[in-house]
Image: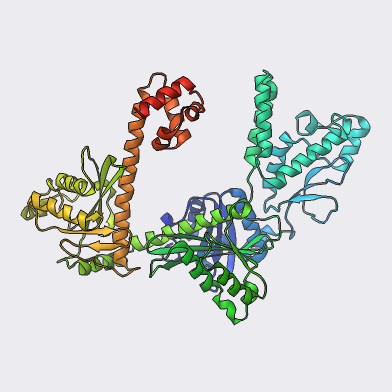
Amino acid sequence: MADQLSFRPKTSEIPTEPGVYRWFDKNGRILYVGKAKNLRARLSSYFAPLDSLHSRTRRMVTSAADVQWTIVKTEYEALQLEFQWIKEFSPPFNIRFKDDKSYPYLAISSGDTYPRAYITRNRELPGHKYFGPYTNAWAIRETLDTLLKVYPVRSCSTGVFNRAKSTNRACLLADIGKCSAPCVERISKDDHKKLSNDFADFMGGGDNKHIESLKARMLVASEEQHYERAAKLRDNIEALEAVLEKSTVVFNDQTDADLFAIADDELAAAVQLFIVRGGRIRGVRGWVVDKELERDMQELVEYVIQNVYAASKRGTASEIPKEIIVPETSLDLSALQLWLSELRGSKVDIRVARRGDKRALQETAMTNAQHALAVYKMRRSTDFTARADALAGIQRALSLSEAPLRIECFDVSHLAGTDVVASMVVFEDGLAKKDQYRRFAISETTDDTDSIYQVLMRRLKYLKAPETDAEADPTKFSYRPNLLIVDGGQPQVSAAMRALADSGITDLAVCGIAKRLEEVWLPGESFPVILARATDELFLLQRIRDEAHRFAITFQRTKRSSAISSTLSEIAGLGDKRVSALLKHFGSAKRLRLATVDEIAEVAGIGKALAQQITASLNP
């Protein structure tokens, strides 16, 4: 299968989030658009042996030359985005979704005396409010069925309604609580109208005000000991929470905008562009750029905009929308807006989305950008040729006698000088060996250099003499590295060299990497080694250093959380549940220590007297 579909992505590269995927042929035409709750599980099914696939699926995958995906937050967003792209691109393998060239909507006949909620494919009826569209009728049926439990508006046809009214006998929906039965006057015309307005407001607004209102009513009913009413309200809350999936891929207005999200690190940046026209996402573009020079986010935004819209100088100014949404505004915002406005022929506004639908859509775009950057870094780190080039580049840059096939990196972490810990991570042939990572707790130290010295002394005592190194087990702590890296500059490197000398080891290469400018420091040198940006060797060194930092931070946080939990547990009246509630409420030990007695007393189960004990224990 892999031989026949050479473009198949690695399984580890496919996200497990919900999203929409597209299959392309060799000419870039979209063959198929689909959605999935779990992109990895769904796309993996297409890469099964060819003879096990349905004939139509087999024809599609063998005609394809590429597959791409876009992550969204919910299945509902995936449903909406799938519909938009099917409508926009008419993929040949999606014909089955267009049996009658229309899609179902949830409609409310707000112009009727007794408004009706129902499903229709006709969006031209006067006096109606429409919600949708949906590509699958079952999705809207489930939504309507759930909402009728909370808002039991009329859903029957005119004929059924008139027959029930003439016989003064309600239908089954009224008996099971899914209709308020205005046909037999169990609810007044005005009250039913209000009920239908609430229904429409919930579907159109997509906010939490209805849920909050129900929660308040539930609490009142519970306090008044009307437990059956409280239970019904609780069920209604759960029903609304199940339905409430506010779409971030469709706007209510006719927004024309390009929305950018950028995820970056020191060496690369992943850009996601969501193209919104008429309130709908019409396209998604994504790419990764290597940062030849250090750029902050504002510079990146300016760089990306200039490169994306430079093509408009050839007369395609219509490609520039009237609104461009970016993660941060450029330092030269007015000049950039003027340049784009001249290209477009009318005003262009560049701004940051702070709230609402556009902010939510930017978060979705950022999720895709972060995933793209992670995939890019994974591909570089798992590519054998790139790893070999990186190790050879490190050998040249550091003037080593051989390529450093085994590298150990050390980092120190602490909180204002307390809870000092250190980490050791191991990379062999450019790949992490997580089973050989080590953590160190440091009880007493004067500064970071002293911590580095202590940790290396503890590590180096396990190394055997060079002549017996061939017999050492690579999986054991006694296996000799080719290169030691410390996080920091010349002071940390000097501390490492002092540890080597005191341990009697003189044949190990040492370097330090300073985070701010990615400088590599060698022992005894007054100036650092500057590696060219976007090179495989700098990428590998950075990845090793970042992994050591991550591992140290994780250990330090765990130790700190454990320490404060132990302190809190010693206070009379504080059990595990109250300790967990305190840490969850304040989020960190530091915030808990800074909290006042009144703030601590606000936590459920913590009174003022207990809060005073907590404050006294944490701040002796």
Percent of width and height locating residue 222: 65, 22
Q: Is residue 9 left or right of residue 414?
A: right
Residue shown at the point (78%, 45%) measured from the top left: 118
Q: Nearer the viewer, residue 535 or 174?
A: 535
Residue shown at the point (65%, 31%) measured from the top left: 215
Q: How is the image coloured?
A: rainbow
Q: Quadrant of the C terminus?
A: top left
Q: In this view of the protein, can residue 287 be seen by the observer?
A: no
Choose top left, top right, bottom left or bottom right for residue 206: top right
Q: Quadrant of the N terminus?
A: bottom left
Percent of width and height locating residue 352: 57, 58
Residue shown at the point (20%, 61%) measured from the top left: 404
Choose top left, top right, bottom left or bottom right for residue 112: top right
Q: Is residue 83 left or right of residue 555?
A: right
Percent of width and height locating residue 451: 21, 46
Q: Is residue 304 left or right of residue 444?
A: right
Q: In this view of the protein, can residue 158 be seen by the observer?
A: yes
Residue furthest to the right: 166
Percent of width and height locating residue 65: 50, 68
Residue shown at the point (67%, 58%) measured from the top left: 97
Choose top left, top right, bottom left or bottom right for residue 540: bottom left
Q: Nearer the viewer, residue 477 or 591?
A: 591
- 605 lies above or below 530: above
Q: Nearer the viewer, residue 334 or 130?
A: 334
* Numbered-mark total: 0
